[in-house]
Image (cartoon, rainbow, N blue to C red):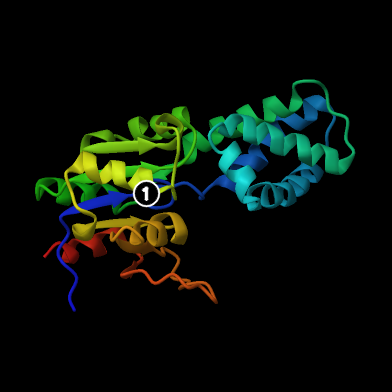
Amino acid sequence: MNAPPIAALLFDLDDTLLDYSGGVDGSWAGACHACCPRAGVDPSVLLGALAETRRWFWDDAERHRRERVNMLGAWQHIVEFALERLGCAAPDGFAAAVARDFAARRREVMRLFPDALDTLEHFRKQGVPLGLITNGDAGQQRDKIERHGLARFFDTILIEGEFGTGKPEEIVYRHALQALGASATTAWMVGDHLEWDVSAPQRLGVRGVWMDREGHGLPSGSTVRPQRIIRSLDELIPLER
């Protein structure tokens, strides 16, 4: 059976519209090399510890949920944990300085994916109601939206840090659909997170589109079945017909 055309479209932000992951390693490296010499810390050693600590820090689902609404604080905690792993006594304020330097570098290197604006402009011109649902820090997520000129495309924007809760809680998707005046069964959601952007909205009847930009395919053993898997946002355009 063919799926109905798109009557409303919900977007994720990070790594869907915005290249959030690109430049992370380089930004950490830049921050370490800028801050470590003044504190007598070996930047290469700290950078290695940070790589392990970042994975450990974000792999815990509850810690991820708790910390992502204050990203500057989270990055400071990551540096502090990395220093603990190394048994390194850094000066007071060092971890906070590294976190601030990293944040500034990340902000400068983040870019929209090349297909983002044209795709949003297309659906906007067609009169398709658009919503943006993003988890994370209120200030940082709002800054990304404003900095990259995205607010003008969306009829509703839900940021976890502003709304009070985030994906995959049902209330988030329901609130967005209500704001768009759309029913779940005629709405689609696109994003790179299989649980938050595909499986959770599917449970409400929303059709899920998984953004797989690298073309890796579904993870082995995944039980999530997106209605569509795309590598570029412009692949959404034929779905409206």
Q: Eyeballing the image, is 90 above or below 236? A: above
Horizontal and vertical percent for residue 108?
48, 35
Residue pushed farthest bottom? 1
| Depicted 177 relative to depicted 205: above or below | above
Tell me: residue 68, above or below residue 94.
below
Q: Which residue shows up at 16% across the image and 44% down it?
A: 181
Residue 118 rendering spot, x and y as whole percentages: 22, 50
* 58 sits left or right of 238 in the view: right
Would you say residue 32 is visible in this rendering? no
Q: Which part of the image, by quadrant, shows the C terminus?
A: bottom left
Mark 1 closeness class: few <14, some 14–19, many ≥20 residues within 10 Å? many
The residue at the point 43 percent across, 51 percent down is 15
Is residue 137 in view from this perspective?
yes
In the figure, residue 193 lies in which quadrant?
bottom left
For the point 39% across and 31% down, which residue is it? 142
Q: Amino acid at mark 1?
A: Asp
Left or right: 184, with 88 as reference point: left
- Location of residue 69 in the rendering, given as x and y in whole percent from the top left corner: 53, 34
Q: Dot 1 corresponds to which residue?
A: 12
**Is residue 96 left or right of 207 when viewed as pictured?**
right
> 91 or 228, which is in the foreground?
228
Q: Which image quadrant: the N terminus?
A: bottom left
- In the displayed structure, would residue 198 be above or below residue 177? below
Q: Quadrant of residue 234?
A: bottom left
Secondary structure, mark 1, is loop
Name the residue rendered at 77%, 39% in the picture: 81
Numbered label tally: 1
- Residue furthest top as drawn: 92
Indicate the quadrant where residue 179 lies: top left
- Between residue 170 and residue 222, name the one nearer to us: 170
Image x and y of residue 168, in percent: 44, 50
